């Protein structure tokens, strides 16, 4: 009954401390892309830079455990597809909440791609995962994306975020809707914490940091950003700048 409440308090210990999470699940869908050739050194650098939560696939836990700091939270991502197939946007469940708990998880993560023919099956999987997480007291993060031109309109992104929350997600990650005003609307209409994802890689680091700061000021609960962070080298200094913003020092 209280397990989920306790775990959510670890994820969001204070209103001024927004969640700094980094998904590292990309090798299943995209292969060993630039920045993710080796997990352990990257994870170490990210943790030293102030990351709160690392999200990996279940098999990648074996590489992460030897370097995982005692205070770093662990998320297990259980949605999968690969770019090698013809239905790469169709995610299927490849793990369960029970398995994630056995691996030491503080959070379960799944993905739903809205706006494609396979959307109903992914919503069904979201419902299954939500029920599993409820029984075990494990928070559920839904990575809710709109697979339409330009990543979806602000209205479509709000719809996806609300649908994910109302189907059982405790936290929603979605694309930044283009402005702080639109993101503020999303946070107001989504009854669970909202994290922004990285989306398309931005060329300029300062532009990226501005979005992070604007999202925090607009009511966001933090970030869940991968390539816009770990494909910039060196990773550590940028991670520390992000941590300053999300953990209060640089919040506007």
Image (spheres, grey):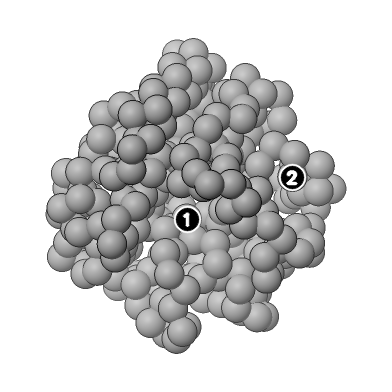
Q: Secondary structure at mark 1?
A: strand
Q: Is residue 233 left or right of residue 127?
A: right
Q: CA distance from mark 1 to mark 2?
A: 18 Å
What is the crowding at mark 1: few (fewer than 14 residues within 10 Å), some, or many (at least 20)? many
Q: Which residue is mark 2?
A: 60
Q: Disc count in the image?
A: 2
Closest to the camera, between mark 1 and mark 2, is: 2
Residue visible at 28% across and 62% down in the picture: 149
Residue visible at 29% across and 56% down in the picture: 148
Asked if 141 appears above or below 44 in the picture, the reply is above
Q: Which residue is mark 1?
A: 224
Give the numbered dot on residue 103: none
Asked if 17 appears above or below 6 in the picture, the reply is below
Asked if 238 appears above or below 45 in the picture, the reply is below
Residue 190's spot in the image, x, y percent? 22, 42
Q: Is residue 238 left or right of residue 204?
A: right
When asked about the image quadrant of residue 24, the answer is bottom right
């Amino acid at each position: 009954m209280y397990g989920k409440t306790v775990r959510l308090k670890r994820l969001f210990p204070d209103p001024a401390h927004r969640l700094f999470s980094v998904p590292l699940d990309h090798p299943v869908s995209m292969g060993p892309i630039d920045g993710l050739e080796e997990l352990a050194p990257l994870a170490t650098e990210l943790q030293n830079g102030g990351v709160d939560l690392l999200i990996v696939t279940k098999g990648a836990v074996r590489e992460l455990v030897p370097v995982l700091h005692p205070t770093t939270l662990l998320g297990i991502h259980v949605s999968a597809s690969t770019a090698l197939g013809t239905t790469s946007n169709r995610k299927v469940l490849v793990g369960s909440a029970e398995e994630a708990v056995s691996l030491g998880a503080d959070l379960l993560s799944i993905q739903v791609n809205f706006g494609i023919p396979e959307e109903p099956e992914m919503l069904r999987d979201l419902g299954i995962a939500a029920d599993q997480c409820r029984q075990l007291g494990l928070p559920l993060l839904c990575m809710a994306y709109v697979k339409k031109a330009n990543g979806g309109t602000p209205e479509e992104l709000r719809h996806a975020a609300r649908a994910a929350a109302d189907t059982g997600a405790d936290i929603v990650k979605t694309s930044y809707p283009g402005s702080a005003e639109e993101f503020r609307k999303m946070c107001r209409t989504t009854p669970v914490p909202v994290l922004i994802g990285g989306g398309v890689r931005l060329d300029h680091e300062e532009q990226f940091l501005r979005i992070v700061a604007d999202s925090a000021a607009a009511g966001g609960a933090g970030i869940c950003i991968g390539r816009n962070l770990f494909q910039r080298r060196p990773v550590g200094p940028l991670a520390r700048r992000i941590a300053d913003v999300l953990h209060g020092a640089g919040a506007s």
